[in-house]
Image (cartoon, rainbow, N blue to C red):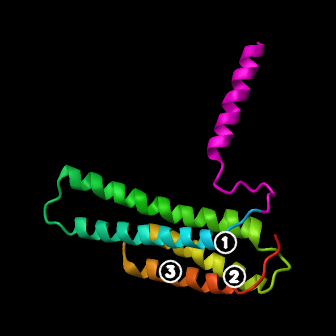
Amino acid sequence: MRILHIFAYAFTTLFIASSLSAHCQVPCGIFSDELKFSELEEHVVTIEKSARLISELSAKEDLTANDYQQLVRWTTNKETHAQKIIDESANYFLAQRIKTDADHYAEKIEMLHHIIVGAMKTKQSAGKDATAKLVESIAVFKLLYLDHPHAN
């Protein structure tokens, strides 16, 4: 019976550890806001490339089985990076960095909402409009956020 408990504990620990995000919400006080913005911007570039390749591939007259498989892979890639933007916006900025007494609190929350909705829209479209709006939202939030001090 004791071995079963040890096995269950080990399994639970591994399962929980594998589901943690890069910044685990332990109050360590170690933050790299500029790095986080670079990551968000890189996700957008990946979404743009994926959407472009989806459009190019789907424009082919005769799609092969390999083409369909590539469409699925590019779509999955695009949606994965959009979800990373949503998760990082919520887990890093909303949960940890923006305090209720922060300067321009309401504006920051509103811009994060635009980013999250914009990322969701990139999941729903392979067009350029959604990514353009997402790029704009991240840029506006970045200026607003980095221009005001934050308490660690």
Q: Are marks 3 and 1 in contact (CB under 8 Å)?
A: no
Residue type at tag 2: Tyr
- Let me know if residue 55 is in the magenta part: no
- Which residue is disc 1 drawn over? 33
Q: Quadrant of the image for the N terminus? A: top right
- Residue located farthest toward the left when viewing the structure as drawn: 62
Residue type at tag 3: Val
- Residue located farthest toward the right when viewing the structure as drawn: 101
Q: Nearer the viewer, mark 3 or mark 1?
A: 1
- Which residue is disc 3 drawn over? 135
CA separation in Å, label 3 and label 1: 17 Å
Residue 35 is left or right of residue 53, and the answer is right
| Image mark count | 3
CA separation in Å, label 2 and label 1: 9 Å
Q: Earlier in the sequence, mark 3 or mark 1?
A: 1
Residue 122 is left or right of residue 87, and the answer is left
Q: Earlier in the sequence, mark 3 or mark 2?
A: 3
- Let me know if residue 15 is in the magenta part: yes
Q: In the figure, residue 3 lies in which quadrant?
A: top right
Q: Are marks 2 and 1 in contact (CB under 8 Å)?
A: yes
Query: Looking at the image, which residue is at 42% across and 67% down?
Result: 46
Q: Which residues are magenta?
A: 1-29
